[in-house]
Image (tube, rainbow, N blue to C red):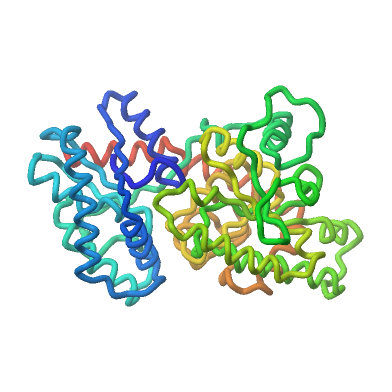
Amino acid sequence: MVNSTAAGGGVAEMLPTMVTLLRDLGIATKWAVIESADEAFFRLTKRIHNLIHGSGQAGLGADDMALFERVNAENAQALLPLVADDDFLAVHDPQPMPLAGMLRRERRVKTVWRCHIGLDQDTAETRDAWRFLEPYGAAYDYGVFSAPEYIAPFLAGRSTIIYPAIDPLTHKNRHLHIHAVVGILSNAGLVGRIGPVVRPPFEDQAQRLNGNGRFASAGAPEDIGLLHRPIITQISRWDRLKGFLPLLKGFAEFKRRCHAGELPPMGELHDRRRALVRLVLAGPDPDSVADDPEGQGVIEELAAAYRALPAEIQADIAVVALPMRVPAENALMVNALQRAATIVVQNSLREGFGLTITEAMWKRVPVLTNSMAVGPRQQIRDNLDGRLLRDPTDRTALADTLDAMLADSAGRSAWGRNAQRRAHDHFLVYAQLRGWLRLLNDLA
């Protein structure tokens, strides 16, 4: 198994469990991560990633291909001692895609390209990305995609579908008792110190964007209210395609209408919910994700939009950076934040699959996501497992749907129950493992 980063994003989270389970079943399995000190390489691969999602500037050329192949050739030499004849080589996503052809010059191997991203539209951007990657596709025996709509044209007829999946026993997804949720949020600095807890505070604390545009303690200027307020939460990588900015604007519109008295009356209890609800936008410390150079820019855009809001609306929005140095602590923070949420949103403009949706489903938290993105609509069925929004940039529709979900307590309970059952049946790691075993058997 080869990918581009050991931390940050769904691929890096899925591979440790998959590698462990394959080893447990007697299949000798290794996991390698490509490396490069050349920041231009990861800027290029981020551009390719965006183009596959139908976003960004088309026009990949010869200089891009030279950089792409140079970095992969360096990594191929480093990987060569790990690869033997008759091995299976599974390469994940575009960043290391040239490796298969390079290693096949020296080794007799079966090869799989596992692409976790895609778009269900044929655009100038997607055509540019597939044209650029097509020369490397010939070296692969088989492709694996997350949806039929994502299959690359040059791998049509020799590809299969395997859903991404979560491990229910990891720090991020395991069951947490109420004391554990409170203790983790306290130790991460996400709630005020409310009394003695069993474990000491985490060395690395969560940080929160302040009105001056700088990050400081997540408890400043006041407690977010995770333990006692209705909370709407999105947790993702800092990526423009994740829809953070439209969600912030949609929630701000909802709060503006609350303050202006423009929302229809729905009873004293719901008026209280409207007044108390807060939005939490959380993601990793952007410096900790090596293959995503856009993270800091996304945070700067959010900071500018946040600073432009009236003070009373700023008070109800928390933009939070979660430390990544200790992966287990980061995973526990995400787990506790999701369990403390009233609604989890994944407002992605484009989404390959969206394991943050799966994580919330498994925790029985109702989800609001985008029906126009293929990955989310494979998981959430509207009004059955959660709610689907057609346009994630429509701030009025976002405000209306969030208000309706907050008002419907019985609906939220039903969506959460149905979502957990659906995640159990289709999106846990055991279903993913069966897919890989079938594929390896066919290739053998």
Q: Residue at x 75, y 25 (%)?
A: 197
Residue furthest right as drawn: 268
Q: Is residue 382 above or below residue 143?
A: below
Q: Specify whether 6 is left or right of 222.
A: left
Residue 412 in picture, x, y percent from top left? 70, 52
- Badge count: 0
- Of residues 284 and 217, the one nearer the viewer is 217
Q: Residue at x 27, y 39 (%)?
A: 438
Q: Quadrant of the N terminus?
A: top left
Q: Residue at x 56, y 38 (%)?
A: 330
Is residue 273 visible in the rendered image? The answer is yes
The picture quadrant where one finds residue 307 is bottom right
Q: Specify whether 255 is left or right of 71.
A: right
Q: Residue at x 62, y 74 (%)?
A: 394
- Of residues 272 and 414, the one nearer the viewer is 272
- Of residues 139 and 326, the one nearer the viewer is 326
Q: Quadrant of the C terminus?
A: top left
Residue 96 in picture, x, y percent from top left? 26, 50
The picture quadrant where one finds residue 443 is top left
Residue 75 in picture, x, y percent from top left? 22, 45
Residue 290 in picture, x, y percent from top left? 41, 49
Q: Is residue 234 above or below residue 444?
A: below
Is residue 407 visible in the rendered image? The answer is no
